[in-house]
Amino acid sequence: MAAVAVTVALVTCGPYEKPTSKDGELKAALFTIRAAIADYERAKGKGPQSLQDLVSAGYLKEVPTDALTGSNSSWSVQRDSASRGGAIIDVHSGSTARGQNGSPYSSW
């Protein structure tokens, strides 16, 4: 019975793929930056104009390194409309690679 359950799980879900350490590092950095953006926006009533604004205002000690590009300046920022100030509202990896699940890291 257990063998049937495992077979069903493998057929329906595919084999388990352990996340790479780079995946974990990227997720942690994205979480940290996104939390800082949200805190900045709550406190100031608007989003930051640059990631460096988060450092200058004390929300980050430094801009985290993108684990996939090895740089802290390669982040792809998503901005609000220009009519609303063009503030940063989200951030993504600057990598063009794809994760183990097939989705581009730049969409995480």
Image (cartoon, grey):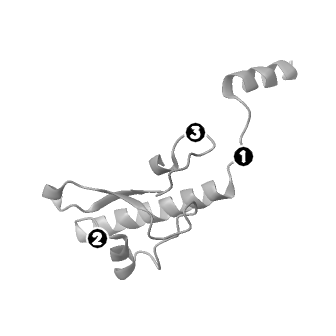
Front in this rendered view, residue 76 or 87 = 76
Q: Give left or right: position of 31 versus 53.
A: right
| Image location of residue 86, percent across then percent down | 21, 61
Front in this rendered view, residue 1 or 80 = 80
User: Regarding mark 2 in the picture, which secondary structure is present there?
Assistant: helix
Residue at 75% across, 20% down: 8
Task: Determine which of the numbered discs, if any, sits on residue 43 in the image.
Answer: 2
Q: In the rendered view of the protein, which quadrant contains the N terminus? A: top right
Residue at 68% across, 22% down: 12
Q: Nearer the viewer, mark 1 or mark 2?
A: 1
Above-or-below relation of 38 to 54: above
Question: Which residue carries the number 1 mark?
Answer: 18
Question: Which residue carries the number 3 mark?
Answer: 102
| Image location of residue 53, percent across then percent down | 33, 75
The disc, 1 or 3, on the residue closer to the chain's N-terminal end is 1
For marks 1 and 2, give the CA distance.
Answer: 38 Å
Front in this rendered view, residue 23 or 73 = 73
User: Regarding mark 1 in the picture, which secondary structure is present there?
Assistant: loop
Local packing at callout 3 (Cα closer than 10 Å; few below 14, some 14-19, many 20+) is few
Q: Are marks 1 and 2 in contact (CB under 8 Å)?
A: no
Residue 67 in which image quadrant:
bottom right
Above-or-below relation of 10 to 38: above
Query: What's under tag 3, amino acid-wise?
Result: Gly
Query: What's under tag 1, amino acid-wise?
Result: Lys
For marks 1 and 3, give the CA distance.
Answer: 14 Å
